[in-house]
Image: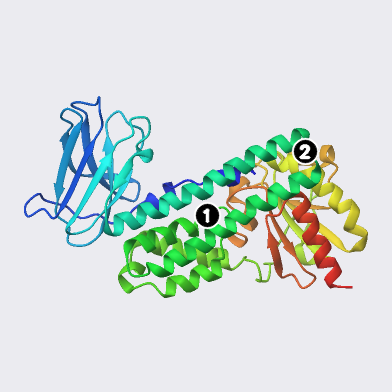
Amino acid sequence: MKKLILLSLSLILLASCGQKNTKKDANVEISGTAMGMDKAQVKLITYEGMKPIPIDSTTMKEGHFKLAEKVDKPQLVFLHVDGIPSDLPLILEPNSHIKVDLDREHIRRSAVISQGLNKKFYDYLDQLKIFRDKQEKLAKLYQAAQQKGTKAEQTNIINRYYSIDDEKHAYEYKFIEDNKDNIVGGLVFEATAYDRAEPNYNKLAKLYDKFSEEIKKMPNVQNAYQNVKDKAAVSVGSKAPDFSAPTPDGKQISLKDAMGKVTIVDFWASWCRPCRAENPYVKEIYKKYHDKGLNIIGVSLDKPGHKEDWVKAIKDDGLTWYQVSNLKYWQDPIARKLYHVESIPATFILDKNGVIRAKNLRRDRLEAKVKELLEEQK
């Protein structure tokens, strides 16, 4: 659950192509305050890939700074102040003025006052923070419920937690559609495309089609769209790709061979603590529903030369279902090329026809989906 709380903005702040600016005929002003930071260097930068490219700089005077730039079209830049961690993203557009009240502890918490596209961008970031704060509160409630609460309380908290992901994605889809002709829509598309909370990739692909040609050509949007297309191939409603790999005794087994009325493809590894923590719950679900048609095939991302660790983990955790591994760690072709797995544990729940009906469910939610799919087939 903690992994899902992480909502990093770094993915949306990679890379737009920058343009060199000059103060001649400046049409953008950036001013700011940071009390107690006299003589600190203030810099504007952009990125080419991960490489920072300086645009301009000035020196803080008595806690104040001012920068004036010229842009021909909206541009994503970053404000960096020596002595403050990280950078502050800003969208410059012609005839705009941005005021920044800098937070000395962390620049991302600075107050930003502006209009136009930069305001839209920060309205989005503010709404994201609301969703994140709600989930952080629920995470704390869940931890307390694990100590003192009932199983029903824990399930209720988990369901509320995931419902916030759904609310967030619905907000993002609408935001993207409302901003399909500007850079902010492209940035939010990028952020949503890489969200670990599994957005609807087919919906995102359709939203990409609505972008203006200018936004479609942004390198970061193009990269995000490729990720969307890859993930859509293994999204809910898609046919799960077949595969085969070695079992612990060296035999080959395929997904087709392992299929049941309901099948879980479970990506895990002996070194993955969250995976090992989930195994007892998966074991109970398997024990309860295997005779009714549930099969599981575990795909381990164990490291080359660590077969003994993999085999020992299977034995120690009592995993009696099908197990395969190429022992290639994160270069495993099933995980990376077929299922586009970027973190583990990762689960794909298939119906009898091999169609993906759900992904990355845990504990009670996983059991409820297994039960639902088995009931469908009676």
Q: Residue at x 80, y 61 (%)?
A: 370
Residue 21 percent across, percent down from the top left: 15, 52
Depth check, front residue: 363 or 37 = 37
Q: Which residue is mark 2?
A: 149
Q: Which residue is mark 1?
A: 195
- Quadrant for the N terminus in the image: top right
Rendering coords of residue 47 (x, y %):
30, 49
Res 259 visible: no
Kindly state the secondary structure of the residue where label 2 is placed. loop
Q: Is residue 374 left or right of residue 212?
A: right
- The amino acid marked with disc number 1 is Asp
Quadrant location, the C terminus: bottom right
Local packing at callout 2 (Cα closer than 10 Å; few below 14, some 14-19, many 20+) is few
Q: Which residue is drawn at the image coordinates 57% and 65% (left, top)?
A: 200
Pick out the residue farthest to the left.
24
- Local SS, label 1: loop
Can you say whether 82 is above or below 321 in the image?
above
Residue 244, visible in the rendered structure: yes
Mark 1 residue crowding within 10 angstroms, few (<14) / some (14–19) / many (20+) = some
Amino acid carrying label 2: it is Gly
